[in-house]
Image (tube, rainbow, N blue to C red):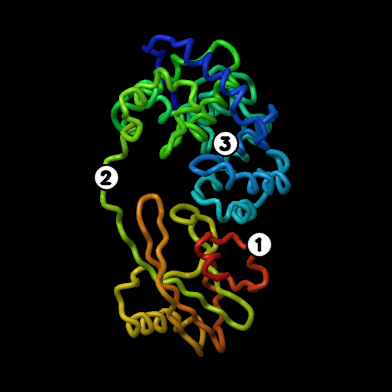
Amino acid sequence: MKRIIDAPVVAHDADFSARLIVWQKQHGRHQLPWQQTRDAYRIWLSEIMLQQTQVATVIPYYHRFLQQFPDIGALAAAPVEQVMALWAGLGYYTRARNLHRCAQAVVQQHAGVFPVDIETLAELPGIGLSTAAAISAFAYGTRAAILDGNVKRVLCRVFGIDGFPGQQVIERQLWQRAAALLPEHDIEAYTQGLMDLGATVCTRTRPRCALCPFQSRCIAHQNNRISELPARRPKKITPEKQCVMLWITHNDELLLEQRPPSGIWGGLQSLPELARLGGNQDAEDVDAEVRYALADVGEIIELRTLPTFRHAFTHFRLHVTPVKVTLAHRYDMAAQAAYQWRSISSLDSAALPAPVRKLLEG
């Protein structure tokens, strides 16, 4: 079981919560589409989409999901492929797979009702302690601490907390601080205020300190350490990977590969890849390798190597060399269950990774 942090060892700070609640009610965000509701399903959906994604990007996806899946039962009953297709372009696709698994778990294990208890919520797929606290606070008025990236930044600056927030000992200190700051009342305004302050005022770069309710007591501001806090993740070399993507067409159809459920672009359809190739090979080597790989796919009438492009993931950078292949004739691929020929005119509804869609539409 995931456990809520131990009882706070930091003294309660009533001034902090009081200032934040007043500020949120006067200057915070009040018109987001998932506000003014106690519907745990809608709150949960927004919280998952907002993980590592900006509000402006999330809003159209949020509306499309609700139109397609108006309640938890509809989402749980949908094929995962349909969920992935709607999510395509939003990134961090593990969220979409967990979203579907979570919906099924809530329906099967909790009769379609999200639990009030935070530890029970946190055990559901894709929901950690902070997200569980936010869902329970907004849906049920539960008094619980959140600690996402925005909140960590606010606390590190206001209270002058040194050290990388992702480090276990620092994160524990932040959880204790967050728990100690909880107000006795107005937990919804307080929780939303933390989110709003970090997202709109105490931003990572160019924070608008003049608008902050804590400017007069912010240690980072007083000591001119705003750019230093929170401490950045220790630098490490970002791995570089390479692959060839095969853009294979026959008549008006495109060959797509179903990616495995886990890993990069897990569960999406994409162009077939040759992972051992990349930008370091000369054109003749790439040509020869592609022809060899496609010997059992069909008869090639045209093969053209396109410029290499780069796509950055969280933990590495991928250099992709697209190779456009036109077949005069294709062979039966009945034994290759992971591959599918799909009409080019139907690609709008395909669950394609954003860079692949951009390549095909460019």
Residue at x 51%, y 84% (from the top left corner): 298
In which image quadrant can residue 316 be found? bottom left
CA separation, marks 1 and 3? Answer: 25 Å
Residue 71, labelled with which disc?
Answer: none
User: Is 127 drawn above or below residue 245 in the view shown?
Assistant: above
* Spatial CA span between label 1 and label 2: 39 Å
Q: Which mark is residue 47?
A: 3
Residue where numbered disc 1 is placed: 349
Is residue 68 something that shows in the picture?
A: yes
Residue 359: x and y, percent?
52, 69
Q: Amino acid at mark 2?
A: Lys
Snapshot quadrant of residue 117: top right
- What is the spatial separation of the Cα atoms under label 3 and label 2, in whole angstroms? 29 Å
Q: Whole-percent x and y of residue 341?
A: 60, 73
Residue at horizontal 56%, vertical 89%? 328
For marks 3 and 2, the one nearer the N-term is 3
Badge 3 crowding class, 10 Å Cα cut-off, few under 14, some 14 to 19, many 20 or more, is some
Residue positioned 50% across, 62% down in the render: 355
Mark 1 Cα shell of 10 Å, populated few (<14), some (14-19), many (≥20): few
Location of residue 37 with respect to 293 vertically, above or below: above
Instruction: From the image, tell me which residue sits under label 2.
Output: 235
Give 260 or 156, whichever is nearer the viewer: 156
| SS for callout 2 | loop
